[in-house]
Image (cartoon, helix red, strand yellow):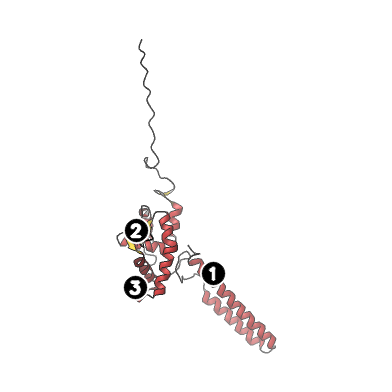
Amino acid sequence: MSNAVPEIEEPPTEGTPEEAGEPESAGFGPLPLDQVFDVLRNERRRRALRFLVENGGRAEMSELAEALASWETGKPVEELSASERKRVYVALYQCHLPRMDDVEVIEFNKPRGVIELGRNAAALNRYLEDAKELRTARPWRGDGDDTTDEPASTRPWPRYYAAAVLVGGLLFVASLGIGALATQVVLGGVLLAVATLSVLHLRDVDELSLPGGE
C-alpha cells in the first residue's frame, strides 16, 4: 500500500481590484467621482488644467498666474498690473493648486514653483473638452461656482441699488413737507438700506472669491 500523501491543489488566488481591472471606487480609475466634480466645478482650476495640457503638462507658477490673470481681466499679459498678477498667484498658491495636488491631478512643487500634470489628470480630460467652449466667447463671467477676485454675480445688484435710491428719493421729497425730523429719518433709512445692500453684495462676492468660494 502506498503511503504517498495526495497533493492538494490550492484554489486560484484572486488579484487585487487593480490587478483584476476593477475600479477602486466609483469614478474614473483611482479618482472618485466626487473628487472629479470637486476639481472641475471651479473655472479657475479648469483653466489651470487646460493651460497645463496645452503647454506640455508643465508650467511655472508665475507663467500660469499670468495666463489666468490675462484671461480673467481681458488684458494682454504685458498690460497686467502687479496687483492683478499677485491676486491670481496667491489664489492658486493657497487654494487651487494644493487642492489638485492632494488628489494627484497635478504635482505641485512649492519650493520650485513648478506645476506638472499628475497621474490622475487623464481622468479629467473628457470634461475639460466638454467645458472648453463655455468661456471662449467673452472674458471672465462667473457661473456661481467660479473663483476670481472680482467675479461676476448672477444677481442684478445695480437694479437693487437703483431701486433703493429711487425709493429713498421719493420718500425724501415726500418728507420735506412734514418736518426736519421726518427728513432725517428718511435719510437714515436710505443710508441703512444702501449699507445693507453693500454688505449683502460683498457677501455674495465673497462666496465666489477666495478663500470662501472654493
Name the side, left or right, on which 23 lies relative to 172.
left
Identify the residue at the far top of this view. Answer: 1
Q: Secondary structure at mark 2?
A: strand
Q: Secondary structure at mark 3?
A: helix
Q: Which residue is mark 2?
A: 116
* Dot 1 amino acid type: Arg
Q: Nearer the viewer, mark 3 or mark 2?
A: 2
User: Alpha-carbon distance for marks 2 and 1?
Assistant: 34 Å
Residue visible at 63% across and 85% down?
172
Residue 77's mark?
A: 3
Query: Which is more toward the observer, 188 or 85?
Result: 85
User: Alpha-carbon distance for marks 3 and 2?
Assistant: 22 Å
Categorize mark 1 by other alpha carbons within 10 Å: few (<14), some (14-19), many (20+): few
* Dot 2 amino acid type: Glu
Q: Judge whether residue 42 can be spotted in this image.
A: no
- Residue 111, by quadrant, is bottom left
Q: Which residue is mark 1?
A: 203
Query: Which is more toward the observer, 132 or 13?
Result: 13
Query: Which is more toward the observer, 67 or 152?
Result: 67
Are the residues flagged by discs 3 and 2 in contact, CB closer than 8 Å?
no
Q: Mark 3 or mark 2, which has the lower sequence index?
A: 3
Q: Judge whether residue 201 can be spotted in this image.
A: yes
User: Alpha-carbon distance for marks 1 and 3?
Assistant: 30 Å
Identify the residue at the far bottom of this view. Answer: 177
Q: Mark 1 or mark 3, which has the lower sequence index?
A: 3
Q: Mark 2 or mark 1, which has the lower sequence index?
A: 2
Q: Nearer the viewer, mark 2 or mark 1?
A: 2
Residue visible at 55% across and 78% down?
161
* Dot 3 amino acid type: Val
